[in-house]
Amino acid sequence: MGKHQGAPMPASLRHGFRARAHPARSVPCPNEHCRARPHQSCIVRVNGRTLERPHPSRVARWAVTVACCPECQVQPGIPCHNDGQALADVHPRRIQEAKETLA
């Protein structure tokens, strides 16, 4: 028999659960071994273990979507760069900026 799904969770309760989660969970995880969808926890595919914290690549993707970079002066949604060369990652200051926007 398949899993039984009860009544849908009310939006007010769902918001409370999500509010306690890391804000990076609002974006999909780009980690090739995880690929968690928005609002789902990151996992280890090999054993299915749920991670307490999102993958660093997911945190970086979230920072790009919500914060300007104080290092290279780009707007949200634009990847960080170094002298015109796009970076594969983001500047650490941008992640810090994203965390401060929540406070």
Image: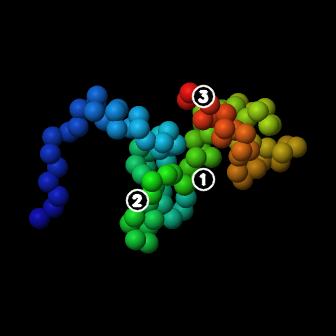
- Does the CB distance between marks 1 and 3 fall below 8 Å? no
Q: Please indicate, yes or no, whether residue 31 appears anywhere in the rendered image.
A: yes
Q: Position of residue 13 (x, y in %)?
A: 28, 33
Q: CA distance from mark 1 to mark 3?
A: 19 Å
Screen quadrant of the C terminus:
top right
Q: Earlier in the sequence, mark 2 or mark 3?
A: 2
Q: Earlier in the sequence, mark 1 or mark 3?
A: 1
- Does the CB distance between marks 2 and 3 fall below 8 Å? no
Front residue of 87/56: it is 56
Judging by the rendered image, the residue that carries numbered circle 3 is 101
Front of the two marks 1 and 3: 3
Q: Position of residue 7 (x, y in %)?
A: 15, 40
Establish if 32 lies above or below 64: below
Q: CA distance from mark 2 to mark 3?
A: 27 Å
The kind of residue tagged 2 is Thr
Q: Identify the element where label 2 is drawn.
A: strand
Near mark 2 (Cα within 10 A), the count class, few <14, some 14-19 or many ≥20, is: few
Please name the residue shown 55% across and 58% down the image.
Answer: 31
Label disc, if present, on residue 57 of the rendered structure: 1
Task: Return the residue found at the far right.
Answer: 83
Q: Identify the element where label 3 is drawn.
A: helix
Please name the residue shown 73% across and 39% down the image.
Answer: 93
Judging by the rendered image, the residue that carries numbered circle 2 is 50
Q: Position of residue 63 (x, y in %)?
A: 62, 39
Residue 66, quarter of picture: top right
The kind of residue tagged 1 is Ser
The kind of residue tagged 3 is Thr
Q: Please indicate, yes or no, whether residue 77 appears anywhere in the rendered image.
A: no
